Amino acid sequence: MEFHFIITLLFPGPQGGLGYLTRGGTVSARPGQTRQDLYNQVWSYLRETVRDVDISHANTVFFSLEPNELPSAV
């Protein structure tokens, strides 16, 4: 099943202060996977793809995970 996610991270800024990063996308769940498994999968994706800022000490301030398929209108 495919899910849509939105995640916002708060991280120490390179010049001091704080920075925010928000990303969205889709992630697919295999049978038996949990919400925690998908959260960890999203974090792995971010560690591999975010290069413009250091998110190694980031905190999650928002995470949404919802089925990507919308109900059909009858």
Image (cartoon, rainbow, N blue to C red):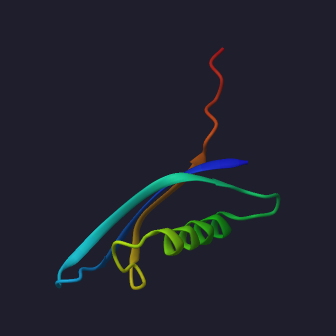
Q: In the drawing, does residue 17 fall left or right of residue 45?
A: left
Counting from the top left corner in percent of width and height, residue 55 is at: 39, 78
Q: Residue furthest top?
A: 74
Q: In the drawing, does residue 40 fall left or right of residue 11?
A: right
Counting from the top left corner in percent of width and height, residue 5 is at: 53, 54
Looking at the image, which residue is at 65% across and 63% down?
A: 35
Looking at the image, which residue is at 71% across and 65% down?
A: 34
Please state which of residues 51 and 24 is positioned toward the viewer in this rendering: 51
Counting from the top left corner in percent of width and height, residue 17 is at: 17, 80
Looking at the image, which residue is at 17% across and 83% down?
A: 15
Counting from the top left corner in percent of width and height, residue 59 is at: 39, 77
Q: Residue furthest front?
A: 51
Q: In the drawing, does residue 51 fall left or right of residue 64?
A: left
Height in image: 28 above or below 58? Answer: above
Q: In the drawing, does residue 36 fall left or right of residue 54?
A: right
In this figure, what is the number of numbered marks? Answer: 0
Height in image: 70 above or below 51? Answer: above
Q: Residue furthest right?
A: 31
Q: Quadrant of the C terminus?
A: top right
